[in-house]
Image (spheres, helix red, strand yellow):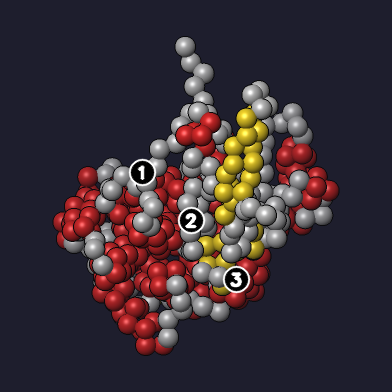
Amino acid sequence: MKNTMTMIDNRTGKSYEFDIQDATRGPSVVNISSFYAQTGMFTYDNGFTSTASCKSKITFIDGEKGELRYRGIKIEDLAPKRSYLETCYLLLNDRLPDEQELLKFDLELRHRSLLHENLKNIFATFPTGAHPMAALSAATAALSTFYYSHLDISDENGYQEMARRIIAKMPTLAAFAYRHSIGAPFIQPDIDRSYTENFLYMMRAYPGGKMHHGINGERKIKAIEIKALDTIFTLHADHEQNASTTTVRGVASTGAHPYVAISAGISALWGRAHGGANESVIKQLEMIGSVENVDKYIAKAKDPNDEFRLMGFGHRVYKNFDPRAKILKNLQDQLKDELNLDSNLMNIANKIEEIALADEYFISRKLYPNIDFYSGVILTALDIEKSMFTPIFVIGRTVGWITQWMEFKKDKEKKIARPRQLYLGK
């Protein structure tokens, strides 16, 4: 039996044959790269719902089973047990690091976290109050002017240096974007602190290294806070060929600088239908206002004549419970206990979750809580401003983007991205 698919044009009776390529996991694909040459037609796939745009060995998703794997490792076996830096090493090198490799990797990122002095001046050109995502995208693109040699990477050492530099600097860029947005002085990275702790430090500290004070004196960064944010970074590290990753690969296909490709990915992520969804979840919870109002808004969400849509439920790929959401749900419960949280927003979110998971309307439509539903609540519990929710997504996703960029550049069959269209004009 041939491993092919035969398509018949019923208008002419002519048949065409295309190879089927089997995946190691997930659906096989029909290779239609010769479809136009054979038939004189294009295929039409609005939103690329059934199109594989590349071959990849990085991340696998099974939306029906609710499964996510990085380099073959289930997210449930990775996020609770391994650090974000271990996850970064895994994605970049296709294996987890040993103790010495992790130590060396950690130290390298700490020392690469500092920004060129001239790069910091770029933030001064933005108006105070500028959204951190806009500043972050612009500053990331500006990195390409300082590391122009990355356009001509020719060996693995060059790829690794380029990748580690952007992973190390992204938390600093994000923290600087936030500090500028509120008119606060920048806090330089502290290389004595771990990757995730250092980001919280740059967000919270005063000049001189002192932390914000509360009613009980100087506020320390708690281990549970570091673990929570580190887990969020890990869960966001990569997610196959989503909109922003596809953007990064598309820009990479033109031969543009890798940091420009990452900047384009940041811009794509900003949209509320993608990375901006967690910010929208919190805004909606604030709009609902109290637990007493939840039933009214659930009814609005179920009303086909009402434009209201419940944010944080459902997913383009997952038709089962998002595995990342399950991990964050457990983390949220842990935070509630260890930080003695009993906030109004968390109570509203818990009530919505309780109703939705038992309501046939949501169950039949497979509208389960997704990662954005829980991440926004957790980040709020960590006293992080809504405007920084998506930049935190950027920090976590940077390793995925740059790994995808590397995979594309090393692909001997790579081509510039150039979709076609169904023309309906005059």
Task: Judge whether 307 appears above or below 337 on screen.
Answer: above
Q: Quadrant of residue 380?
A: bottom right
The reply to whether callout 3 and callout 1 are in contact (CB within 8 Å) is no
Q: Which residue is more in the foreground, 77 or 95?
A: 95
Could you tell me the amino acid type at mark 1? Ile
Between disc 3 and disc 1, whose residue precedes?
A: 3
Q: Residue at x 60, y 75 (%)?
A: 77
Crowding at mark 1 (Cα within 10 Å: few <14, some 14-19, many 20+): few
Task: Judge whether 330 appears above or below 129 on screen.
Answer: below
Tell me the number on the disc at residue 416.
Answer: 1
Crowding at mark 3 (Cα within 10 Å: few <14, some 14-19, many 20+): some
Dot 3 corresponds to which residue? 74
Tell me the number on the disc at residue 204.
Answer: none
Could you tell me the amino acid type at mark 2? Lys
Between disc 1 and disc 2, whose residue precedes?
A: 2
Q: Residue at x 49, y 63 (%)?
A: 57
Query: Which mark is in front, 2 or 3?
Result: 2
